Amino acid sequence: MKISRLKKLLVGIFCVVSLSSCGAEDDEQEWFPDPQVYSIRLQYNNQNIDGQFEADISMESLVFTAKIVKDQGSYFPKTFASSDTLVAEINQNGEVTLKREGETVISVSAGDKSHEIVLIVTNEYSTHTSYSLTVMGGHAVDLDGQIVTSAEQYEYLTLVPDVPTHKGFLGWNYSVENVWTSGNAIKMPASDLLVTANYEDELYKLTLVGAQVSKAGDEDDPVQDEIIPAKSIYDVKNIYHFAYGTEITIKALEAPENKLFVGFDYNNVEDNRIGDEGREEYTFTMSDEDSTYKSVYSSLSKNALHYDSAAKFTYSGATVTKIQDSSDADLKGYYGYQLDFNGTISPIKTGYTENITRTNIDTMTTFNPLTMEVLFKNENPNYSIDVELYLSYFGNLSTTGVVTVPASSTIKTYMHANICVPSACSWGFAIRDSITGATSSDQFRFKFAVGAAHTYPNGYPLTKVGSDYQLLNFDTTTITNGGYPKSTSGWGSPGRVQYHDSVGGMFWASYASTFGTRTGEYKYINIANYPSYDADKPISNIYFKALNLVNNIDEPINEFTIYVVEVPSGTSTSDPTKFNPTSEDVTVAGSLHVKLEKVNEVYLDKMEVTRTSSSTNMFLVIAKDHLEGTDRYAHNVFMQFAYNNVFGYIEE
């Protein structure tokens, strides 16, 4: 006969396999002032029972008595009870009737004391059938910790849920009723058993500041779980909870007056930008951590397309008129242009003709990219028009891409100008395809306008400098390109290089049609503030940061070598051979090879420079190593130099 392992662990076992009887204790009824019961204990045959008592069903009945320790002369009635009367019943005289195999708790109480034991009713003639146990979403283990898939009746088991990632365990469902359970512990019933684990999605908090959820999964505009108020609607926190993997679309609130939405900052980190600049909606998959998105707004310029009264736009076959008022509400008061033409106008299908001049776009003064909202309005009621607006400047191209503007519609789209665009730059506009079906009798009026704002209202983090920055300064009167002297405008030729002492940096635009076809493919410039020669400390460090602004996505490689060469004081900058880093007659004090392979890649490094004399000057030399193709809009890089490690370079 098999006894469960739990039963083996309990003490005080009495086994009785034949009929027996025992009389109950009689207590005299007598009044006693403030009587107390000190203890009560179940007994069988005048022996205390501890833990459990086992009896075979063949006994049919037995009698339990109760030993009470109480104040002498006091009277307390005893109360007997059975927790499962289908297994055994007990009357108030302690007489027990055994009814079937199983377990029941027998208790006795008097006054404020009680005692209980487990009565185990066995059947030595039973077959102890093993029943199958199937656990869906988990497994079962016995008292030895072994995984089991079957068990005998009354055997104690523990259910273990196999909780999936990003789920929470709720509980168990059972295929039969009245299964004894206690938490994850069960007692096997007299039947096969199917147990199913129940789970629910774990939810993660999403906090939006200046934005709301427009779609979550299949639900449109879900209601917030909590709203934390603030003085400004743009500082109100809208709190939601979503399951991992839910597709979420958030939408920024409409921008305040004279502001433009420029992007979302992520997880309470300033300028930790995510999503496309200017796009009010951003779609992402909910992560398995709490997340915060904050809408960022920047001061708006409405005259991005007009630099001054000399600004102009010409387009063959169209009458062009400036727009510089708020008479057309669809254009939001942005400056722009109006074209009037007929249906036979010739499209500009390819290329980027710069037909808009002297516009008010400048990122090189502020070293801060621009986010631009572009509005296209087609007033013709019958035909759609394919158009493109773009901005180009020495190797850089920003564009809306080709946009189809339906009949009688206004379309909003966006452009982004990186930090290589000075004022008075050139834009272009093109009708990219013929207007199918239109004739000379079909009249068109088309308008476009642009609003612009700095993408980072607190300063561009990739070029921002602090008071602790020890920046390199350059003598711009010495900029030379392998024998081709600088132009009077301050730009090197060929290619375009501009130095900026305010950020210790330079912008360099090079492309195959200029730099790549010249024989002198290096540029050099005097470092105006290089440290004085110190024989005890001849080595200085120059820390370097580069931002790859290349527009050529198919061929984004920017590869070059930076040198510092040491030349005797008074060396003429008009002789490029004196600065050629590949010449045996030129002293190279330090060098750094740079290869940028991804659009918007940030590169950090350090160069050790050794100076050998106090009667020399130190020149920075840049030599181009790699240039592919003939695409004008190809290779741009912005570089910064400092004597101290302020760019975040990790020292080896």
Image (cartoon, rainbow, N blue to C red):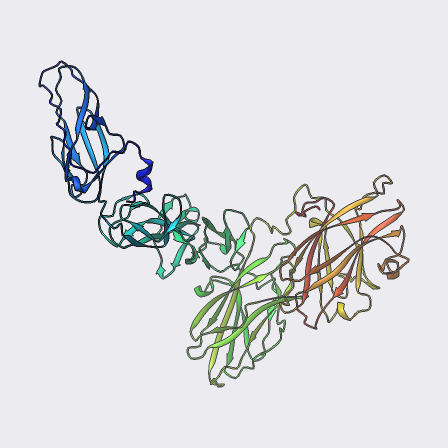
Q: Which residue is drawn at 45% across and 58% down?
A: 285
Q: Residue furthest left?
A: 29
Residue 386 screen position, x and y as percent = 51, 76
> With 440 as the anchor, is 125 left or right in this view?
left
Q: Residue at x 17, y 24 (%)?
A: 111
Residue 292 screen position, x and y as percent = 46, 49
Looking at the picture, does residue 240 appear above or below residue 576? above
Is the N terminus in the top left, top right, bottom left or bottom right quadrant? Answer: top left
**Residue 490 in view in this figure:** no
Looking at the picture, does residue 12 appear above or below residue 597? above
Residue 125 screen position, x and y as percent = 22, 47
Looking at the picture, does residue 528 appear above or below residue 91? below
In this rendered view, identify the residue nearer to me: 47 or 204.
47
> With 414 as the anchor, is 173 left or right in this view?
left
**Residue 506 in view in this figure:** yes
Residue 56 screen position, x and y as percent = 20, 40
Choose top left, top right, bottom left or bottom right for residue 308: bottom right
Choose top left, top right, bottom left or bottom right for residue 97: top left
* Mark count: 0
